[in-house]
Each structure stands twice: as structure tokens, then as C-alpha cells.
């Protein structure tokens, strides 16, 4: 069953795309700039995206192997579960979720009350450095999205 579920997730989040980095053409320029700066500052960071709490893609800077809308939807689902777990366990708000897989990390940070920042990184990434750079980026993204 686990193998079948893994294949389903892979099918939902990966598609063949022409070479080059995927970006969302209508993404807010300030948010997209935050994503590009984050990639430049963290070695072994392979991509990032910003999604609304309901799973809509806001901005993406992803490798061609990851389909942005599918990843945004999967991220929102995981984020909802993380919020519920944090609230049940401690009665408090959610800040971040770290998923460590065999080939790398997926880390989702709260970016204000209505969005999230998800970053993808290789297995050898310095996780401390990733947090050090991504947490302020998530706060900056929240500020950009809060502007009228």
C-alpha cells in the first residue's frame, strides 16, 4: 500500500517539462525575488514555492521535474495536517514542518496566516543554514502578500 501511495504522490507532483526552471508568470515580483534570493543563498537548495492555505500556487522557483500546482496542492494538504497536529499537541500555532527523505528535504514554513513557503533541498544540505535563510524569507513573503 505504501508503494502505491508513493507512486500516486510522485505522479501528482512530477511531470515532464522543458529544460529550465519553472516559474509562475503572474507571480508577485517581490515574492518571486525572495524565492530566487533564497536559492542563491542556500547551497543545495533545489527549488521553492509559495502556496495559499487552500493549495493555490502563488509563486514557484522549481526544477523542471516538479509540477508547481500539484506540489502546491500536496503542500497545502500536509500543512493542514501539521496545523492540526500542533494545535492538538500544544494548543499553539504552526511554524514549520521538516520532511527528510532518502534523496533530500522538503521543509514547509508558515508565511503569515494565509500562505506557506515550501523549500526542496538535496540530502547534503546544511539544515541549520536552510532554516537560518528560509525563516526570514517566509516572514518577508508574508509581508509582501499582506500589502494591498
Image: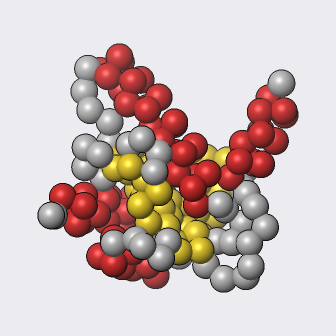
Q: Is residue 97 visible?
A: no
Find residue 46 and report its horizontal and vertical position in percent: 59, 70
Quadrant holding the C terminus: bottom left
Is 134 left, or right, of 57 in this rendering?
left
Find residue 107 and report its horizontal and vertical position in percent: 49, 51
Q: Residue at x 74, y 79 (%)?
A: 18
Q: Is 121 or 145 nearer to us in this picture?
A: 145
Q: Residue at x 47, y 28 (%)?
A: 81
Say which quarter of the image contains residue 130. Answer: bottom left
Say which quarter of the image contains residue 142. Answer: bottom left
State how the image is colored.
Answer: secondary structure
Q: Residue at x 24, y 61 (%)?
A: 145
Find residue 127 and report its horizontal and vertical position in percent: 49, 58
Q: Is 140 or 107 nearer to us in this picture?
A: 140
* Depicted 8 relative to depicted 85: above or below: below
Is 56 left, or right, of 11 in this rendering?
left
Is 103 left, or right, of 124 in this rendering?
right
Find residue 12 and report its horizontal and vertical position in percent: 71, 48
Quadrant holding the N terminus: top right
Q: For the image shown, how many numbered marks are present on the structure? A: 0
Point out the residue furthest to the left here.
148
* Depicted 92 relative to depicted 60: above or below: above
Is 116 left, or right, of 23 in this rendering?
left
Q: Residue at x 50, y 71 (%)?
A: 24
Q: Is residue 71 visible?
A: yes
Amino acid at each position: 500500500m505504501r508503494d502505491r501511495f508513493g507512486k500516486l504522490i510522485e505522479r501528482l507532483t512530477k511531470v515532464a517539462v522543458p529544460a529550465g526552471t519553472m516559474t509562475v508568470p503572474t507571480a508577485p515580483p517581490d515574492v518571486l525575488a525572495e524565492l530566487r534570493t533564497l536559492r542563491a543563498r542556500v547551497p543545495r537548495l533545489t527549488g521553492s514555492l509559495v502556496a495559499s492555505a487552500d493549495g493555490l500556487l502563488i509563486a514557484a522557483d522549481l526544477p523542471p521535474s516538479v509540477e508547481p500546482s500539484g506540489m502546491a496542492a500536496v503542500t497545502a494538504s500536509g500543512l493542514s495536517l501539521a496545523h492540526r497536529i500542533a494545535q492538538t499537541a500544544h494548543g499553539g500555532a504552526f511554524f514549520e514542518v521538516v520532511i527528510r527523505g532518502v534523496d533530500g528535504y522538503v521543509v514547509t514554513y508558515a508565511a503569515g496566516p494565509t500562505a506557506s513557503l515550501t523549500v526542496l533541498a538535496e540530502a547534503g544540505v546544511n539544515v541549520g543554514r536552510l532554516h537560518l535563510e528560509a525563516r526570514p524569507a517566509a516572514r518577508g513573503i508574508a509581508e509582501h502578500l499582506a500589502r494591498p
